[in-house]
Structures are given as C-alpha cells and as structure tokens.
Amino acid sequence: MVTRRDLAIALATAVATTAVVSLAETPVKPVMHSNVFPWEGFKAEPTKTGARRECFDGPTATLGQFAAHVTTLNPGEMPHPGHRHPEEELMIVKEGTLEAVQNDKTVRVGPGGMIFEASNEFHSVKNVGKTQAVYYVIKFVPPGLSTKRPE
C-alpha cells in the first residue's frame, strides 16, 4: 500500500530531478575577462527603427550579466515603448539627439551625454533629431537577478 509519506518522497524526488535537469540544460557562459571590442567587430543588424550592433554579453567576476549593444535610431523613432526592468542600464549618446523620459521627467541629450536608468524605474528614449541617433547601451545585472521578460 502506498502511504502519504511515499507520495511525499516521490513528489520531492520528481521536483528535485526536474530542477537538476533544467539547470543542466541551461548553458553557462564563461566569465568575461579583460578584452578589447573594436567597432569593426560590431555587425549592424537592421531593425524596424534603425539598427542594432551586439558588443558583448556574459557574466563577470562581480556581475551575473554584463552586456552592451549599440542602437542606431532613425529620426522620430523609439526602439520600443516605455518600460521598466530590474537591471540597471547606462546609455551613452554617440551621435544625434535623444529625448529621455524617466518617470515623469523629460530631458534632451546630445553627443557625449549619458542616461542612467535605475532598477524598476519607468523610462524610454526617442530620437528627436533630424538625423540618426547612435547610442551605446550597457546593462549591469547582479548575480541571481532574473532579466527574463514574460512572453
């Protein structure tokens, strides 16, 4: 006869097995070390609002994820609607003029300017210039912070 204890042990074993299998299937990226990332190595991939260049993405000795990309945004465009996310983000404007919305504040930022987006604060950017805007996006994700978005 199967007892409640037997069922509890079977359930605990099934949950533990599922967790171990899912962890084993998750690819682990190696920790990033000092490196140089030349501009020529960033391949421009077209987007509906301009282009995106991936620079790097991986864990470091102190971060769960450290990632950077370069966005090229056509005049009048936004890369996506305003949003919030748990990771912190730094944007550095290379060319053009962006309008940055942060919570209830709107500011224009030009070449050399920087935009910091704090964890879970509402933000968006829009190219308000007459030429393309190009800016670097650097994401800082502490260990254990999930950045997965609901589908």
Image (tube, rainbow, N blue to C red):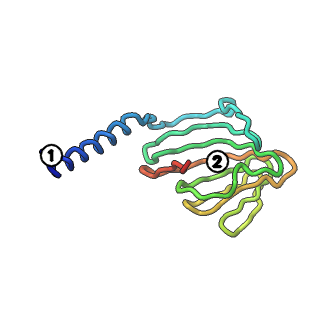
Residue 137: mark:
2
Amino acid, disc 2: Val
Task: Give coordinates of residue 58: x percent, y percent.
Answer: 50, 39
Q: Residue at x 68, y 50 (%)?
A: 92
Q: Residue furthest left?
A: 1
Task: Give coordinates of residue 28: x percent, y percent.
Answer: 43, 36
In this orientation, which residue lies closer to the viewer: 140 or 18? 18
The residue mark sitting in front, 2 or 1, is 1
For the N terminus, which image quadrant? Answer: top left
In this orientation, which residue lies closer to the viewer: 36 or 40? 40
- The picture quadrant where one finds residue 56 is top right
Element assignment for label 2: strand
Residue 151: mark:
none
User: Relative to residue 6, is residue 121 drawn left or right?
Assistant: right
User: Relative to residue 14, is residue 47 drawn left or right?
Assistant: right
Proximity of marks 2 and 1: CB atoms separated by less than 8 Å:
no
Amino acid, disc 1: Val
Q: Which residue lies furthest to the right in this view?
A: 130
Residue 2: mark:
1
Q: Residue at x 34, y 36 (%)?
A: 21
Element assignment for label 1: loop
